[in-house]
Amino acid sequence: MFDSMKEGNAYRCLINGRWVSGRQPPIEVIQPADKRVLGTVPALSKEEVDEAFAAAKEAQKQWAETPVSERSALLHEASYLLEERAEEIADVLSREISKDYASSLSEVKRTADFIRFTADEGKHLAGRTVGADSFPGFHKRRFSIVTRVPLGVVLAISPFNYPVNLSASKIAPALVAGNSVILKPPTSGAISALHLAAVFSEAGLPAGVLNTVTGRGSEIGDYLVTHPMVDFISFTGSTAVGKRIARQVGMVPLLLELGGKDAAIVLEDADLDDAAKDIVSGAYSYSGQRCTAVKRVLVVESVADALVEKLKERVLALKTGMPHEKVQITPLISDQAADYVQELIDDALAKGAKLVCGNRREGNLLWPTLFDFVTTDMRLAWEEPFGPVLPVIRIQDAEEGIEIANRSEYGLQAAVFTKNIDLAFSIAERLEVGTVHINNKTERGPDHFPFLGVKSSGMGTQGIRYSIEAMSRPKVVVVNLEP
Ligand code: NAP
Ligand code: G3H
C-alpha cells in the first residue's frame, strides 16, 4: 500500500490521485530522538499547490453527489486498513515525533475508531422541515425544507503532536459531509500523515477528493490560507499561528483549536491519591506536549504539602528515555522547544519557586520537572511550556482558584477535584473554558464529545457530530402552497 508514496526514503504528495515528487528541493524530516533523517517530503511550489486545489475543486462536485452511504462505506474501509497497518504506522509515528511507541499505537487505533464512528454518524445527518405558521402572521401552507450541504474544499492544517489523529479528525468529517480536502500536515509529522492519506487512497477515494500539500508552514502557510479556492479552514496548532490565520482569511469560515493552560483546582476535601494520579498522567504524558495537558495545579494551602508529596512520588516514578522504550518521557520535538521550556524553568527558579524534582536536561530530553510555590509573577504561571514541567500554585480557597484560572489568556479545559459535587458544578459554571472535568484530568476524548476552546484557545467546536456540522451548512428551500 505504501510503495508508491515514496522512492527510497523520499516521500511524495498525493495530488489528484497520484503520488508526486515536488519540483523544488525537498525538506528533511529529522527524528527528534537521534537527529537522523527519517525521510524527505516535498516542499511544494505555489504552482503545485494550485494544482492540488484545482483537483480538489473539480473532484468535490462528483463527491458531493455520491450517496452518503457510499461515502460512509469508504470511510469504513479506510478505518479497517488503518487498523490493519496500525503497528507499521505507529512505528513511523513514534520515530518521527518521538512519541513513545505505546502512545503512538494508541493514537493510530483511536484514529481508526474515530473514522469508523464518523462514517456512522455521517449517515444520520438529516435536515428538517420548518412550518411558517409558528411565526405570527404566517400560514401553514408555507414551509421551508432544510437540508445540509457540503461547503466545498476544506483546508485541514494539523499540528505535530497528533499528526495522524488530528489530521483524520478533520479529513473524515469533511469527507463524509461531501467536501474534498487539502491536508497540510505539520513538517514534523508529515510522513505519518502521508501514511494516513495513503490509507484513504487505498480505500478507494476518488482522485482529487483528498490531496496533501507538504512544505514549511512559514513558507507556504499564507499562500494556502488565502487561496481563493478554500471554502473552509480547520486548523489545530499554536495560538500565534491561529491568530495570524484569523487575521488573514476574511469571510472564509474557520475552526481553530489552539493552545491551552489547563488548570487543575484541588480543594480541601479532594481524594488526594486520585488527584495526584490523574494530574501526573495528565501533565506528563507525551512529555507534556498535549494541548489538554494539565499545565498548572491550583491547590488550597491546607492540603498543598500532602498533594505535592504525592505528586513528587509519582513524578519520580516516571520513566525517561527513548521513544521505542517503555517510557513516558521522551525527547521533545526540537532543541528550540526544549530551550523554551528551559527558559520557563530558569525564570521560575530565579523568582524563587521551589524545585521539587527534575530540571535535568540532555539536549532536547528534559526530565519531568515539578515546581512548588510558583507565584503569579512567574512566566510558568501563564505560558504554555509544551514540555514536562508542572507548576503548583498555592491558593487560599476555591474563589482564588477560579480567579487565577480565569485570569489566563487561554480557555481550553480545567479540572476540579472535590467530593462536594454541588460545589464542583458551581465552580464549573464559572470557569471560562470549553470543558470542565470533575475529578479527572483534562483530556479531549472520547472523540464524539464536543471539544472547544474559548478566549485564545480556539473558535468553533470539534467532536465528531459537531465537526460534520461545522463542515456543512443548511440549504433552505421554501415551499409556498396556495392558501
Ligand atoms: P504550530 O507551529 O502552530 O503548527 C501547526 C501547523 O500549522 C503545522 O502544520 C505548521 O506547519 C502550520 N503552520 C505554521 N505556520 C503557518 C502559517 N503561517 N500558516 C498556516 N499554517 C502554518 O503548532 P505545533 O507546534 O505544531 O503544535 C503545538 C501547538 O498546538 C500547541 O500550542 C498546542 O496547544 C496546540 N494544539 C492545540 C490543540 C487543540 O485541540 N486545541 C491540539 C493540538 C495542539 P509546519 O509544521 O510546517 O510549521
Ligand atoms: O493536543 C491536543 C489533543 O487534541 C489532546 O488530545 O487529550 O486525547 O491527548 P488528548
Image (cartoon, rainbow, N blue to C red):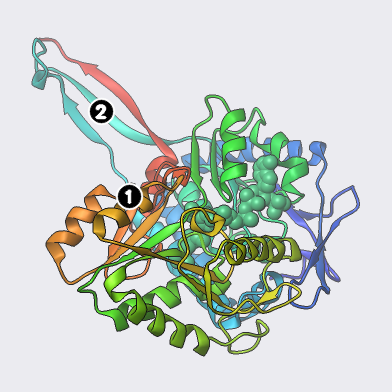
Can residue 155 be spotted in the picture? no
In the image, 204 versus 253, the foreground residue is 253
Q: Is residue 378 left or right of residue 20?
A: left
Residue 24 location (% of width, % of height) = 90, 48
Residue 230 visible in the shown view: yes
Mark 1 — residue? 403
Q: Secondary structure at mark 1?
A: helix
Q: Give the residue pinned by disc 2.
A: 145
Q: Does 196 appear above or below 355?
A: above
Q: Report the front residue among 52 and 437.
A: 437
Which percent across, then down, holds residue 209? 60, 47
Question: Which of pointers 1 and 2 lies earlier in the amino acid sequence?
Answer: 2
In x, y percent, where is residue 149? Answer: 41, 35
Task: Specify the label residue 214 is tagged with.
Answer: none
Q: Assess mark 2: CB under 8 A from ligand 1?
A: no
Q: Secondary structure at mark 2?
A: strand
Point 39% across, 49% down: residue: 452
Q: Amino acid at mark 2?
A: Ile
Q: In which image quadrant can residue 326 be found?
A: bottom right
